[in-house]
Amino acid sequence: MDDRLASAGYEHVPDDAGGTAAQGWWDANAAEYLAEHGRFLGPADFCWSPEGLREGEARLLGDLRGRRVLEVGAGAAQCSRWLVSHGVDAVASDVSAAMLAASRAYDEDTGLRTPCVQADARALPFADASFDVVFTAYGALPFVPDAGRVHVEAARVLRPGGTWAFSVTHPVRWAFPDDPGESGLTATRSYFDRRPYVERSEAGRVLYAEYHRTLGDHVADLAGAGFVLERLVEPEWPEGHTRTWGGWSALRGALLPGTAVFVCRLPA
Ligand SMILES: C[S@@+](CC[C@H](N)C(=O)[O-])C[C@H]1O[C@@H](n2cnc3c(N)ncnc32)[C@H](O)[C@@H]1O
């Protein structure tokens, strides 16, 4: 199989080529990703974003005592492991076998056992109304063309009154080059251009795709799945935080939002 990156840019891709590519891309890149970001993320910590917003302080999910919690697009399940370390009944899921293998390795390192299931967030192997809270920190949603299906699945597995919370790149960022430096401060694309960012192999195969949705698109998807949006959190860049993560940096964080965290509820 031809896996070498040959081109990158913004373009529409047919049907589910991007969504299908995600599993292969994360399987191939899990080790490199965790080598770069693993120390910042974990192994047993709940970080919502490159700004370092942590659930331990933000408490966006409320009191989780006695709650059953599902994480989708969990990666190496650092967030769920943190919940498990606090006595919460949490299950992690992800489409990538390599990410789940990394999760098991973190379990061995920490002595914590984090239940993990391999699953596409658009087709969850769980019963209706079986969780009180579903969440993801930058998982699944950016990598599928049909994010609405993730919201519908979250709504299906949640009990009435349950919470769905997710963080994504702040939609405003899509108008700017993904550069942590000065050139990342000037808008060069339309905020309304929904073409995904796509990487292709020499043979033209889609290796990676990341999808943009405007704030209005997210709200429409949530309403379509029956959710009520309770909070939209835009974490500010903390003073003294110097770590750069891709296009996120102190320079840009001082001027532009980098992350949007949506906290939603199913009507009771
Ligand atoms: C940026 S990581 C987020 C995980 C973790 N919070 C972190 O920060 O490392 C994105 C994760 O989404 C997963 N993912 C991508 N598409 C998915 C899908 N359709 N269903 C479930 N997980 C998916 C990837 O395998 C990857 O582990």
Image (spheres, rainbow, N blue to C red):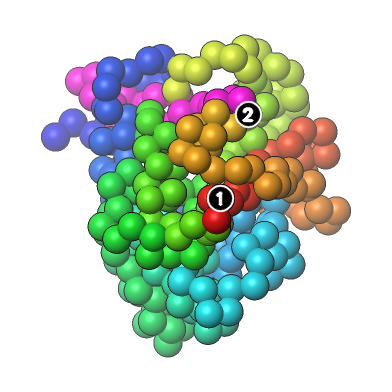
Query: Is residue 108 something one can see in this rendering?
Result: yes
Residue 163 falls in image quadrant: bottom right
Residue 250, given in percent of the width and then of the height, sits at: 77, 44
Q: Which residues are magenta?
A: 197-217
| Disc ID at residue 267 | 1
Q: Is residue 213 in the magenta section?
A: yes
Q: Circle 2 is placed at which residue position?
A: 215
Q: Is mark 1 within 8 Å of ligand 1?
A: no
Q: Residues within 10 Å of mark 1 (few under 14, many from 20)?
A: few
For marks 1 and 2, the one nearer the N-term is: 2
Residue 140, given in percent of the width and then of the height, sits at: 41, 45
Residue 179, given in percent of the width and then of the height, sits at: 63, 30
Q: Residues within 10 Å of mark 2 (few under 14, many from 20)?
A: few
Q: Residue furthest bottom?
A: 111
- Horizontal side of 186 relative to 122 (left or right) equals right
The three-letter amino acid code for the residue at tag 2 is: Leu
Where 262 falls versus 220 (above or below)? below
Q: Residue furthest front?
A: 268
The three-letter amino acid code for the residue at tag 1 is: Pro
Distance between the alpha carbons at the discs numbered 1 and 2: 21 Å
